[in-house]
């Protein structure tokens, strides 16, 4: 039994190593997706904060979503990561900030 | 006598070909759209996001609006996200550049985009067929861990999406197999910049396509490198997307002007010979999707004529062109599951139109 558990741990570690790049990127997806698509929902499509909040909602919850209406900038936080998107202009819409 | 009559008929038909100016003409509302609306706009109850969730439906026949309906908060003036419909519109912008002699289909992309020097065999035509051969995993929220498109849009690729794609290894020789890739579309967007130069590029989609068509709602987001996100981030009103459909329907003609070469539209509508058929799925043409019959004569959208083609995007966005019926259909949506069926909508629209003579 113990041997099987060890084999599983080793296999899991092997998988995690082979997928280390994707696993490292994963926590950043939620905040970046939410910031970008919420920004576009609000400032390109012109929908309300309430609608856009529901529009970007995923199965993992955000810990923080803030709209700075004057600068047309969105800050989103989730899974310990933070992302910001800002409206760039009438033809250029929104973009994630570096 | 007969000759004269035919000539007269031809002339009146030519004069009667309506084009939208600032506004679209409307046909007299005599058709019954109940079955279409019942399918496209079921009541959205509760907080769930399941089922068919149409935001906009616009049906244009013979250049006139025959039906138009929106679901709040989307309206006729909403520039709606088109997701991957953007790819086919990018191809249309490229068609203008093609007509201006800026590139040939056989040109290697590396000629216009030096970051592709490691993949010198990838030609414009291969990218338009989504057949660059570059390693790619196109999946959205269902498999975010392994998805190249999620990484491109939101994490390691987001600052320069074309460079991110170009950094992938070749998984197959260029032009040999169809692998749907948003990366291929963004490589085309980077190639366009190389053809034009940095000064001309940001305005080119407007100058080449949107302004001549009278499109004033377009928003096209760019990555941090300044490249249009040709794969995903074009926003248009439903009526403005229908203008692209009408241009395609009329083989690249807009009023008296051949804006796109007719052979470009023919290329868009020609199936990619090396694509493997997936049952029930439309065939890739030149960055458009075709209702091409398979070897057994089965069409992916059996209710629609074989000439039907479309630009299709995530969450149910669609622009359908049905040349046999002089028909353009725009559908915007927020479908979060797979309930919606292209054929189900096309079937009901075609049935409603067929009711015209009854």
Image (cartoon, coloured by chain):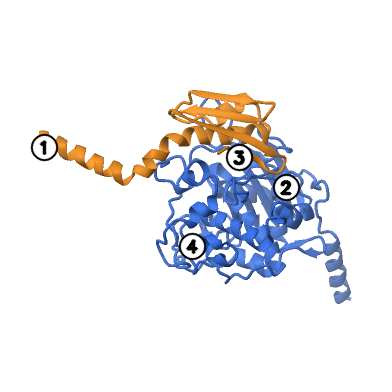
Chain colours: A orange, B blue
Query: Alpha carbon of mark 4 to alpha carbon of mark 3: how far?
Result: 27 Å
Kindly indicate whether the residues beneath marks 4 and 1 are on one polypeptide chain: no
Callout 2: 10 Å neighbours few (<14), some, many (20+)?
A: many
The answer to whether marks 2 and 3 mark residues whose Cβ atoms lie closer than 8 Å is no
Question: Which one is earlier in the sequence, the residue at label 4 or at label 2?
Answer: 4
Question: Which one is earlier in the sequence, the residue at label 3 or at label 1?
Answer: 1
Q: What chain does mark 3 sit on?
A: A
Kindly indicate whether the residues beneath marks 2 and 3 are on one polypeptide chain: no
Say whether residue B50 is visible.
no
Q: Give the residue number, with chain letter if any, for mark 3.
A: A95
Question: Callout 4: helix, strand or loop?
Answer: loop
Residue at (54, 67) in percent of width and height: B123
Callout 3: 10 Å neighbours few (<14), some, many (20+)?
A: many
Kindly indicate whether the residues beneath marks 1 and 2 are on one polypeptide chain: no
Q: What is the x, y in percent for residue B196?
A: 68, 61
Locate residue B153 relative to residue B329 in the image: left or right: left
Say which quarter of the image contains residue B207.
bottom right
Query: Alpha carbon of mark 4 to alpha carbon of mark 2: how far?
Result: 31 Å
Kindly indicate whether the residues beneath marks 3 and 1 are on one polypeptide chain: yes
Query: Alpha carbon of mark 2 to alpha carbon of mark 3: how far?
Result: 23 Å
Q: Give the residue number, with chain letter if any, for mark 4.
A: B132
Give the number of the disc on residue A3: 1
The N terminus of chain B, quarter of image: bottom right
Q: What chain does mark 2 sit on?
A: B
């Amino acid at each position: 039994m113990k041997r099987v558990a060890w084999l599983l741990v080793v296999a899991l570690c092997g998988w995690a190593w082979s997928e280390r790049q994707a696993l490292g990127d994963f926590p950043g997806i939620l905040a970046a997706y939410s910031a970008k698509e919420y920004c576009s929902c609000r400032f390109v499509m012109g929908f309300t904060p309430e609608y856009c909040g529901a529009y970007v909602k995923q199965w993992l919850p955000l810990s923080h979503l803030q709209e700075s209406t004057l600068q047309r900038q969105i800050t989103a936080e989730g899974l310990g990561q933070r992302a910001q998107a800002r409206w760039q202009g009438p033809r250029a819409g929104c973009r994630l900030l570096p | 006598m007969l000759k004269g009559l035919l000539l007269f008929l031809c002339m009146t038909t030519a004069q009667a070909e309506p084009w939208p100016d600032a506004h679209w003409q409307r046909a007299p509302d005599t058709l019954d759209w109940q079955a279409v609306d019942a399918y496209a706009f079921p009541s959205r109850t509760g907080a769930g996001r399941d089922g068919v969730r149409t935001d906009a439906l616009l049906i244009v026949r013979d250049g006139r609006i025959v039906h138009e309906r929106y679901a709040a908060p989307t309206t006729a003036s909403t520039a709606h996200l088109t997701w991957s419909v953007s790819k086919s519109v990018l191809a249309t912008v490229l068609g203008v550049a093609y007509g201006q002699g800026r590139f040939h289909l056989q040109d290697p992309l590396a000629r216009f985009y030096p970051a592709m020097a490691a993949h010198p065999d990838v030609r414009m035509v291969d990218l338009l067929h989504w057949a660059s051969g570059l390693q790619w995993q196109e999946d959205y929220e269902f498999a975010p861990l392994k998805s190249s498109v999620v990484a491109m849009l939101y994490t390691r690729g987001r600052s320069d999406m074309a460079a991110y794609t170009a950094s992938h290894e070749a998984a197959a020789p260029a032009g040999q197999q169809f692998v749907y890739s948003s990366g291929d579309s963004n490589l085309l967007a980077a190639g366009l910049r190389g053809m034009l130069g940095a000064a001309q590029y940001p305005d080119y989609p407007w100058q080449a396509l949107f302004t001549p068509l009278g499109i004033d709602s377009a928003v096209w987001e760019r990555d941090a490198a300044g490249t249009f996100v040709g794969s995903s981030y074009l926003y248009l009103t439903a009526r403005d997307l229908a203008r692209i459909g009408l241009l395609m329907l009329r083989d690249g003609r807009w009023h008296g002007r051949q804006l796109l070469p007719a052979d470009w539209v023919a290329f868009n509508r020609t199936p990619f010979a090396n694509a493997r058929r997936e049952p029930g799925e439309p065939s890739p043409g030149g960055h458009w999707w075709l209702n091409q019959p398979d070897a057994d004569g089965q069409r992916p959208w059996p209710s629609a004529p074989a000439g039907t083609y479309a630009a299709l995007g995530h969450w149910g966005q669609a622009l359908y062109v049905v040349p046999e019926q002089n028909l353009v259909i725009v559908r915007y949506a927020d479908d979060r599951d797979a309930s919606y069926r292209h054929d189900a909508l096309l079937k009901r629209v075609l049935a409603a139109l067929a009711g015209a003579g009854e």
